[in-house]
Amino acid sequence: MIVRQAANVLEIMEFFAQVKKPATLAEIADHFGWPRSSTFNLLATLSEKGYLYEPRPRAGFYPTPRWLAMARMISEVEPLPPWTHQLISDLSAETGETASIVAPAGVMAVFIDVVESKAAIRYFATIGHRVPIHATASGRALLLQYSQEERDSVYRKIEFKQYGPSTPISIEAVETELRNSIARGYCQSFADYSRDLAGAAIPLPIGDRRLSVVVAGPEFRIGPKVPEVAALIARTVDRLRPKTSAA
Amino acid sequence: MIVRQAANVLEIMEFFAQVKKPATLAEIADHFGWPRSSTFNLLATLSEKGYLYEPRPRAGFYPTPRWLAMARMISEVEPLPPWTHQLISDLSAETGETASIVAPAGVMAVFIDVVESKAAIRYFATIGHRVPIHATASGRALLLQYSQEERDSVYRKIEFKQYGPSTPISIEAVETELRNSIARGYCQSFADYSRDLAGAAIPLPIGDRRLSVVVAGPEFRIGPKVPEVAALIARTVDRLRPKTSAA
DNA sequence: CAAATAAATTCACATATATGTACATTTTCC
DNA sequence: GGAAAATGTACATATATGTGAATTTATTTG
């Protein structure tokens, strides 16, 4: 069950992140197609909690810096080491495609850092973007770091859907692809989940965190180059990852 | 009406900002005394939207960097000019008390930047903290920037409560205090709202934004010094505020 | 300055939603 | 390795909550 009003809070914040200016109750209500009365209640709640204020007269609401203060407190804990951002930054620059750091979230994989391609046609992904863990290169690079038992436990929760022509639609299909990935030395995906999208990924364990790096883009552009992109990823990780025993 | 599930989202985020480590469903449910089933729904919603993930096996949930990314986008718009933070930083250092920048939010005043005193006994305030606009020095410093009509409109929505012995409990009382403040050259408050708390504030218009600066602390410590603190605030603003025509 | 229009706010009720209960899964402990 | 405890998940139902309609307040227009 999705908690509607919880989702609405996120929607409102995303709305402000997008328009980047104060908005009145009426504007917000109209934008989402919400009743004024409901919008009123939501805005009142957020205001009461100190997350919205009125920066200038009659211009409406805008988030207080409290969001930022809280997000900073949350993110200063075990941030990704700086070299991981350097990593995807370099990869994106060299390949011209979108590069990301990915982490597990149940049966899904979440993008926790992204550097977007600058190409007009590109893989559009943002931090927080989620994809099925079994049907993507990045996800499978995470699964490779699981024990057999842990993988089985994940499999039990997966709803196998035919997202595209090559989506693995059974546990055995996924396990086979994982074995192939090990043999190959990297994970790949050709429209397994998103149409026209191809990518290469490798596992990126950091401390006890299981992460992966992925470079992805339109199939026609990146498809033929997947092996060399994978090699580039491996080389770049080798170059940037500190060699200390502190892993 | 307060929207419970919207408030709960904020509570959860504040929880993570406080404990600064991943938490399992059970831990969160127990912490808030929420039913497991409800907690499950809420966590599922936040996860689905890409705001929570599972950083390491069986350690539970933690917010994704998406919060930070969004907060940054929101806050990069018209941030406070850097000298305002310098201002409260200097004021706090020189007075040893808590100094803040305050903005209006209906009948309340919101703290949008805070530098806390380092004293053991101090005014504990955080970004997002809200106080009644009419019953605080910082709030009245905002009201001074309103036109008479705008103030009247605010007064109509205020519920006058006797927070402390000197709380103004009528429109006329507030207006009188505003006139006194103008004559005095600064706004002050002695336990008008919070017991044992005294403070001095002056208006701080920036562009078309109506803000105020306040220095506040325990009455016994700051009380006798309010006039000199007010003078210090004025001098410090004079020193730091750019003199350019761009105001 | 008055009338008209738009925005914000309140409130009672139908309905969408949070929850208690039951079940499944995972982990711990012996 | 098996039983017990803890944790996570599903679902029907009573209830807290979102909403449409009405009212008040603010803003624009003639």
Image: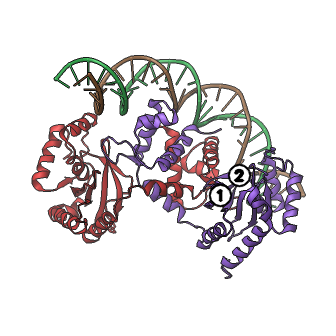
Chain colours: A purple, B red, C green, D brown
Do dots 2 and 1 share one subunit?
A: yes
The picture places residue A231, in percent across and down from the top left corner, at 77, 72
Chain letter of the residue beneath label 2 in the structure image: A
The picture places residue A213, in percent across and down from the top left corner, at 70, 65
In depth, the one of B11 and B81 nearer the eye is: B81
Residue visible at 33% across and 64% down? B85
Disc sitting over residue A111 in the figure: 1
Q: Callout 2: few (<14), some (14-19), or many (20+) C-alpha neighbours within 10 Å?
A: many
Q: What residue type is labelled 1?
A: Phe
Give the image quarter of residue A125: bottom right
Quadrant of the frame with the C terminus of chain A: bottom right
Q: Can residue A198 be seen in this view?
A: no
Q: Is mark 1 on a helix, strand or loop?
A: strand
Ranked by sequence position, the earlier of labels 2 and 1 is 1
Give the image quarter of residue B113: bottom left
**In this picture, is A244 found above or below B231?**
below
Q: Callout 1: few (<14), some (14-19), or many (20+) C-alpha neighbours within 10 Å?
A: many
The residue wearing badge 2 is: A131
Chain letter of the residue beneath label 1 in the structure image: A
In depth, the one of B118 and A209 nearer the eye is: A209
